Image (cartoon, rainbow, N blue to C red):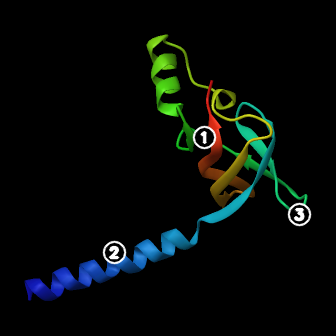
Amino acid sequence: MLRKLAMSLLGLSVVTGVAVAGDTKEASGTVKSVAASSFVVTDSAGKDWSFSVDKSTLVLVKGGSHKANAIKADGKPSTLSEYLAAEQDVNVNYSEKDGKMMAKEVRVKDATVK
């Protein structure tokens, strides 16, 4: 009986994981502009995509953790523009929430923070 319950819970977890993963979408292109809580990416077809960010948004860029540690050591808050800049190529994982595209993860291609 316990084995059946464990297998049922495992099956539920797998199904739930697939449903959540299905909510995430992906876009890629070149950063056009960066603001305090948003950024715009232009895709290969010339379409602009506006993304919002919040504290849970993860920006992955070479040297980013070193930059974050230095900012934290100085007692200053991090800003989006310290990790993301115009003309960088990015991949963005996002979800739609309240009519906005909320960036979950931003991967900066072939760039290093300064």
- In the depicted view, which residue is nearer to us: 87 or 95? 87
Residue 13 is marked as 2
Q: Position of residue 50 (x, y in %)?
A: 79, 50
- Please name the amino acid that badge 2 sits on: Ser
Residue 83 is marked as none
- Residue 29 as seen in the image, left or right of residue 80: right
Q: Considering the numbered disc 1 on the image, is that residue within a helix, a strand or a loop?
A: loop
- Give the quarter of the image for residue 95: bottom right
Determine the residue located farthest toward the right in the rendered image.
46
Badge 1 density bin: few <14, some 14–19, many ≥20, Cα 10 Å: few
- Please name the amino acid that badge 3 sits on: Ala
Q: Residue at x 63, y 23 (%)?
A: 114
Q: Dot 3 corresponds to which residue?
A: 45
Q: Considering the numbered disc 3 on the image, is that residue within a helix, a strand or a loop?
A: loop
The relative height of residue 99 versus residue 67 in the rendered view (above or below) is below
Q: Considering the numbered disc 2 on the image, is that residue within a helix, a strand or a loop?
A: helix
1 and 3 marks in contact (CB < 8 Å)? no
